[in-house]
Amino acid sequence: MENPIFKKYHWKEYFAYGALAAFGYMVPAFFFISQARFEDTWWLYVGNGIFLLCIFIYAVILTSKPYDKKSAMSMLMAGHLTTGVGVVLTCILLAVSCIIFIPSANEILPDAPATITEGKAGSIIFIVFVNAILGNFLSGSFISLITSYAVKRNQTKDKPAVLE
């Protein structure tokens, strides 16, 4: 028996909701990248919150799907796959926007702490990519885990997920 989670239709959903989450993250990240000031790093965490909200919406939508609502494990797997697609798309969009918007001037992150290398574009790129990878993956995985068990109505008749 083939697992429906890996069918082409589901991959279109993973890509669509992952792209929605990636674009949601990129809106606040764009403000941080375009201004390049250390005191505006809170924009990145707003982006993590929007990413989390998009994955949460997808997980709630999964509860009405005929196959996915049968198993909490399949909902968890679908949420993690969507999170992975969203993180990859976010990194691609960040790479493009960093190439376009990060200036090569000497004064990048002027009020940064001593641990951040002053005057180097690599400092802001490191901050943005670490936040995008770790922040988005951890928030997406967390909300997938919580919603796959908390939102599901009847967990007593859970069927085991088939991995083939």
Image: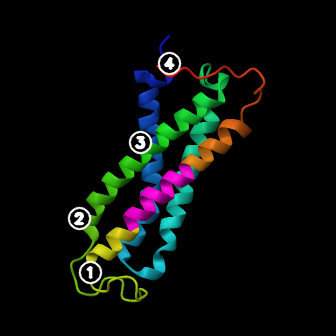
Foreground residue among 145 and 82 = 145
Inter-mark Cα distance, 1 to 4: 48 Å
Residue 99 shows which numbered tag?
A: 2
Foreground residue among 71 and 48 = 71
The image shows residue 152, relative to residue 22, as above or below, that is above
Residue 131 is one of the magenta-drawn residues: yes
Inter-mark Cα distance, 4 to 3: 19 Å
Residue where numbered disc 1 is placed: 120
Write down the region rendered in magenta. Answer: 128-140
Inter-mark Cα distance, 3 to 1: 30 Å
Which of labels 2 and 4 is toward the front?
Answer: 4
Inter-mark Cα distance, 2 to 4: 40 Å
Amino acid at pointer 2: Ile
Q: Secondary structure at mark 2?
A: helix
Residue at 38% across, 52% down:
90
Instruction: Locate residue 7: give its quadrant.
Output: top left
